[in-house]
Every structure is written in C-alpha cells, then in structure tokens.
Image: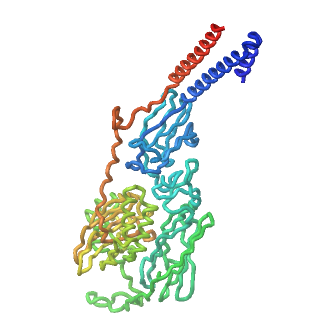
Amino acid sequence: MRIGQSLLILATVIRGKKGMSQTRSSVSGFILLSFTLYLVLSLTAFAADSSNLNTFVGNVTIGGSYAANGVVVDAFIGSASSPATGGSYIVGSKNIFPVNFTMDFACTAGSTVFLKVWGINASTQTCINGQLQNFTNLSVSLTANDGACSYANACSGGSCCSGGITAVNSSTSSGVCQAVACGTGITIPAFSLGASSITTSQTVNFTINITSQVRHNITAANFSLVTPSGNITRNFTIPSNGRNFNLSYKIFNSAETAAAGTYNVTAVMVTDNGSVTNLTVITNMNFTVTAAATTTTDTGGGGSSSSGGGGSSGGGTPATTPAQAPSKETVDAVKEALPDTFKVAAESGNVEYKTVAAPESKDVPAGGEKAASTIDYAVDYLAKTEPAQKELNSIQEAVSSGGATTVQAAGGSVTKTIEVVKATNKVTKEEAVVSVVKLSVVAPADKPLKNVEVVEVIPKLAASNVNQVSFKGEQPIVLEADPVVKWFFSEVGKGQKKDLSYAINKDIRNVGTSTVAVQGRAEATPPQTPPPAPAVPEKKEEGGGIPTEVKKPRPFDAIILVVVVAVAVVGGWFFIRSRKKAMK
C-alpha cells in the first residue's frame, strides 16, 4: 500500500513540473515504471517463498517388499500429529519409477519433518532452506494387533478401530489394530468338554475361549447345564482384568452332585464392562455319568496262614486302594520336566511318583469348522510374529476351503490325554506337580496320510514360554515362543503312529491346551526362515538409476533473473524517452 501511494505522489509531481504538453508521455512512463517495480517485487516474493519449498523423494518398502500402488505417504511438520499442507502422496499416482514417492511442501529451516507410510513412522528429517531436495527411502513393517494405527492397511490383522467399534482410516485419526472387523463384540472361538463319559467319583472340565473384540474387560461368564434332575447355571472364575481368557470349570468338584445320567451344556453367556453380551447356544455338548464301582470291604478275622491265627480284628472297615502308580512311560516324561533340584535324586532313584489325576481324555477337533476356529484363535491372540501368523493362516485357509482335511476326516485318529503326577524328593522332601500330555496321531490301516500338520496351542496360563515345555517324542517346530508349535510329517505310513507327547511342570487340568491335526495341504512344508528384505537400490549419479538430485531454480538465480529483466525494461524506457526529446 505504501509503495502504491508513493508512486501516486510521484506521478502528481511529474505532471506538475512537465506541464500539459508532456502529460501523455509522463503518464506512459509512470505506468511502465510502476509495472516494472511491481514485477520486481512479485518475483522477489516468489523467490523468497520458494526458498522454503522442500522436496522429498525415495522408494517405499513394507515388510521388505516394494509398496504397491495406492499406499499413502504423509508428511508432518514440527510434531508427528501436525500434517504438512500438501504433504501427502499416493504411491503410483505419478509415473516416477523407480522412485516410489515424491512430495513438495514448504517448511521453515530447522523444522523437523516426520514421514509416515500408512501412518507408521518411517523417517525423521530436517528442513534446510536452499537445499530443495532430500532423498530418503522409507521402510516400515505392519503393526501387530493391539498396536496404534491410523489406517487399516497399517495393521497385520486388517482392522484399525477406535475403541474397538469405530473404523479409523486417515492420517489425523488414531486407533488400535485388531484382527477382526471393528465393533464385532465378544467372540467365543472354542469350547470343549474334558471327557464324554465319567463315573460318579470323577470330575469333568468344561473349557471355553472368550475374547472381547471391543477392548473392554471381560467381567462375567457362565454356562447352562441340563442335569437329570433339572437345569442349573454355573459361573466361571475370571482371574483378572483382561479381554482374552481360556477358562475352565470343573463340574462335580464340589458344587454339584454326580447323579448317573446324561448332562448337556446348552449355552454360554459372557459380559464385559462395556455392557456387551454374547449368548451362544450350544448343541451336542454332552457327557454321561455312570455309577462308580462298589468298594470292597475286608471281612476280617482268621489272620494270615503264616500267623497261625489271631490276625487283624476285622470289623468291616473298607479296604483302601492305593493311588495308581504312573507307568514307566509317564515317569520318563515326568523326569524330563522336573526342576533341576530333582535331577540327582531322580538319577539315583530317590524320587517317589504318584498319580494325582488319572489320564483325562481331551477333545481334538474332528470337523473342519472347529479346527479352523481353533487356528483362528491362535492367529488372533497368540501368534505375534509374521512367520507364525502366515503359517497358521495358510493352514486355516486350506481347511476352510477344502484344500486340507482333519486327520480324523481322512480315516486316521488323534488321541490326547492329560495325566497329573506328583513327584516327591525323598531326600529333601520337595514336591513337584507335572502334567503329562500324551498326544498321538495314527494313520488308517489301509492308506498313508500325506503332509500331516499337528498344531498345538498352549495357553500362557499353562506355560509362558516354549522353554517351559519338555517334548518327549517327535520334536516340533516352534511357530511362536508363547508357545504355539507344529509337527510336520510329509507322510505317516499305513497304521503308523507318531508320538507327540510333552510335559509341563504344572497342573494344567483347569487350563488345557488346543490341538488341530490336518493332512493333505498341498503347499505344506516345514516353515522356513523368512527371506531377507530386498536390497534398497543404491543411489546412482548417471542415467538409469534413482536420481540423487532434483534440479530446481535456486532463490538467488531467480533474483538475478528479475534484476536483469528490470534493468532491460527501465533502460528501454529511458532510451525511448531520450529519442522523443531528440525529435523535439
């Protein structure tokens, strides 16, 4: 505004001094001079603004692979939550191969720039005025479940949700990665009974897996049980705040009376602290109870033949049957799992072994749907590494699509029992309780099984790490140290049996483990070490490579150009004016 006023005053002075005869030429000169000054000021301002313009270029890799078209790269200035104006680029939107992204935006010298791929921090840079190009490669890995996210594509599980309910998919929003669609509530991916038939002196475990997908803590869980005398409801014990549990209730342990007959579990209800409820109706979940064998009594009198009479006083006292001693096979498995403080005593025969709980048969899914559900649970809540998730997903997809079947569906058999043994060190009197899981796979007598895969999911409540598990027979491949393991056999011959037993230094009857045995998956192989990420192309100075510099006009080059143009225009104006004076 002040420049315009000054020019107007200057024009008035010129008109006053030159008179009316020179008005037209003076005004023309004034207009030309004004235009020249305006041009100089505009170009100078442009040059000043362009000095803040920074260009970032490079290639993008996700999980070691080059990014596909559609991947979003965002820039933030000053903090990781302040998006830069114009600082967003979609890979593939411009033909700039082999450079995967390029973006231009203004930023003040010294400002910190955060470059993100799908909202995942990939690089931190600093703006430098005058240095109008910055080459940097961006490399990220997908975020695991429960990690922070801004885009669903950033999550290995495929969903980015706020509060577990609302989908998030923008650079300025935040959520948490999860493996299921947002807002699906509570799921019960698996449930099982520990036995299909018991006696009135035994107990049976009913086990469920429950998960709140909306990030609320589970607060209550119960199930309905139909007994020969009526319907009852029983509550599971929730051990602590959490969204994911493997719960077990021991029926006939103390609260119920074991009457002979058939029992049915008909429904499970779970509630979380967000008032979300899941009522799942169950069919064909039943077991039978038969009367226990009659206890024999000692009739007394007479004594033994060697004593010649007298003997015991008799009186009809029930004879006590000693606890069943574990088999040598079981003892061998127990020894492998005993603490180090038992090793010397065990080798010298100074450890006593007693069966605490007779072997209980455990259910192994024979149907494809239940097998897929068990694997799905392991993928979502136990497998955290990409190789483990990839391997389990491949098995699940094959079972769901019919590309593989359970071993039982192919005519084979899978048996699983849990036996609990107490070991006592006779020297130190120290005691230890060990659970022996006897797991075996047997091929049918008339045909072999091909590409057999047996996946065992061991909850953290049973063992927090695979190094707490002692494998007795065939050694498995560790998919996840939490642990999830897999046995693989390219072929199990006709009628052949594979021993997959293991032991854990803990009573796991109320926790349980989950087993899936499948065969026939064409692409099944032992998991391999993942290939290294592709090498990032080196910067090249000459043709064919990725450019190391983006040529742009520098600010001082623009200023020089403006000055040259201004001098030429002003010089031309004075030349024309002098010619007019000469003609006069």
Give the left or right position of residue 316, taking residue 493 as reference: right
* Closest to the observer, 390 or 461: 390
Compared with 80, 385 (above or below) is below
Q: Residue at x 27, y 66 (%)?
A: 474
* Closest to the observer, 378 or 41: 41
Q: Give percent across and percent down for residue 147.
A: 50, 52
* Closest to the observer, 165 or 305: 165
Compared with 310, 367 (above or below) is above
Q: How is the image coloured?
A: rainbow
Count the numbered circles shown.
Answer: 0
Q: Give percent across and percent down for residue 526.
A: 29, 61
Q: Residue at x 30, y 73 (%)?
A: 440
Residue 233 seen in this snapshot? yes
Give the left or right position of residue 312, taking residue 104 as reference: left
Give the left or right position of residue 132, taking residue 535 as reference: right
The quadrant in which the C terminus is found is: top right
Q: Residue furthest front?
A: 583
Q: Residue at x 31, y 78 (%)?
A: 410
Q: Give percent across and percent down for residue 302.
A: 33, 92
The quadrant in which the N terminus is found is: top right
Q: Residue at x 43, y 37 (%)?
A: 136
Q: Give percent across and percent down for residue 138.
A: 43, 42
Residue 360 seen in this snapshot? no
Compared with 85, 307 (above or below) is below
* Closest to the observer, 210 or 571: 571
Query: Which of the 4 image quarters holds residue 496?
Result: bottom left
